[in-house]
Image (spheres, rainbow, N blue to C red):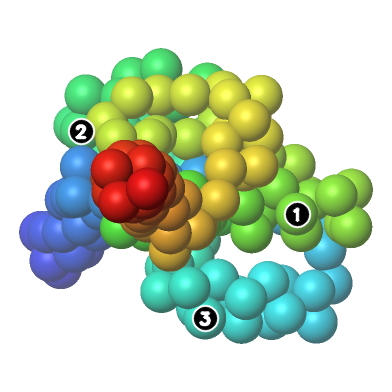
């Protein structure tokens, strides 16, 4: 019986460690003081962006962060915590920071962005960045403006020569 329990706990620790290493972004929040309706609303917003929001026991999460080589997060595993995992580096930070502004009971504690442990202040900085689609459109507009400027220059040279 004990072996089965230990194996199931070990499997959960492995799952959490794998999620930390596979995700582009992981954000740890303390949700103490939020109502069930608030948490359901937050989960709905996160799910719309394909962000997984899970609550794990702190002891298992501590073992998982140690296994994943993120020992700096060990201090953050106090109180009722939830973790948001995503393949998008910005989306969890943006949604959770926005939600924390409207619900001051929720506190952003720390996170892992592209394999690096960051504090709550860094997560708030990242939260103001545009999403993936916004960044792509900004990049494309930069490319387009260079081509447009080149076309204007060629056109003005052609007009000068025809005069």
Disc 2: which residue: 68
Question: Element at badge 3?
Answer: helix
Q: CA distance from mark 3 to mark 1?
A: 15 Å
Question: Element at badge 2?
Answer: loop
Q: Earlier in the sequence, mark 3 or mark 1?
A: 3
Q: Quadrant of residue 123?
A: top right
Disc 1: which residue: 98
Q: CA distance from mark 2 to mark 1?
A: 28 Å
On screen, residue 109 above or below 103: above
Q: In this rendering, does residue 159 appear at all?
A: yes
Q: CA distance from mark 3 to mark 2?
A: 27 Å
**Residue drawn at (58%, 25%) of the image:** 122
Disc 3: which residue: 48
Q: Decide which of 76, 27 is in the foreground and name it.
A: 27
Q: Earlier in the sequence, mark 2 or mark 1?
A: 2
Question: Element at badge 1?
Answer: helix
Q: Quadrant of residue 146?
A: top left
31 displayed left or right of 29: right
129 displayed left or right of 121: left
- Residue 6 position, x and y percent, is 17, 55
Question: Which image quarter is the N terminus in?
Answer: bottom left
């Amino acid at each position: 019986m004990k072996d089965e329990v230990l194996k199931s706990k070990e499997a959960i620790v492995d799952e959490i460690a794998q999620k930390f290493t596979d995700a582009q972004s992981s954000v740890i929040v303390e949700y103490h003081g939020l109502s069930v309706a608030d948490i359901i609303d937050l989960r709905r917003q996160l799910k719309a962006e394909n962000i997984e929001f899970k609550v794990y026991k702190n002891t298992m999460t501590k073992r998982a962060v140690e296994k994943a080589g993120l020992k700096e997060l060990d201090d953050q595993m106090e109180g009722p915590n939830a973790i948001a995992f995503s393949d998008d580096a910005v989306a969890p930070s943006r949604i959770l920071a926005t939600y924390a502004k409207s619900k001051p009971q929720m506190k952003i504690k720390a996170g892992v962005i592209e394999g690096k442990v960051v504090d709550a202040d860094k997560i708030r900085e990242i939260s103001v960045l545009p999403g993936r689609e916004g960044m792509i459109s900004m990049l494309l507009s930069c490319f387009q403006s260079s081509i447009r400027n080149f076309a204007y220059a060629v056109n003005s040279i052609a007009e000068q020569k025809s005069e």
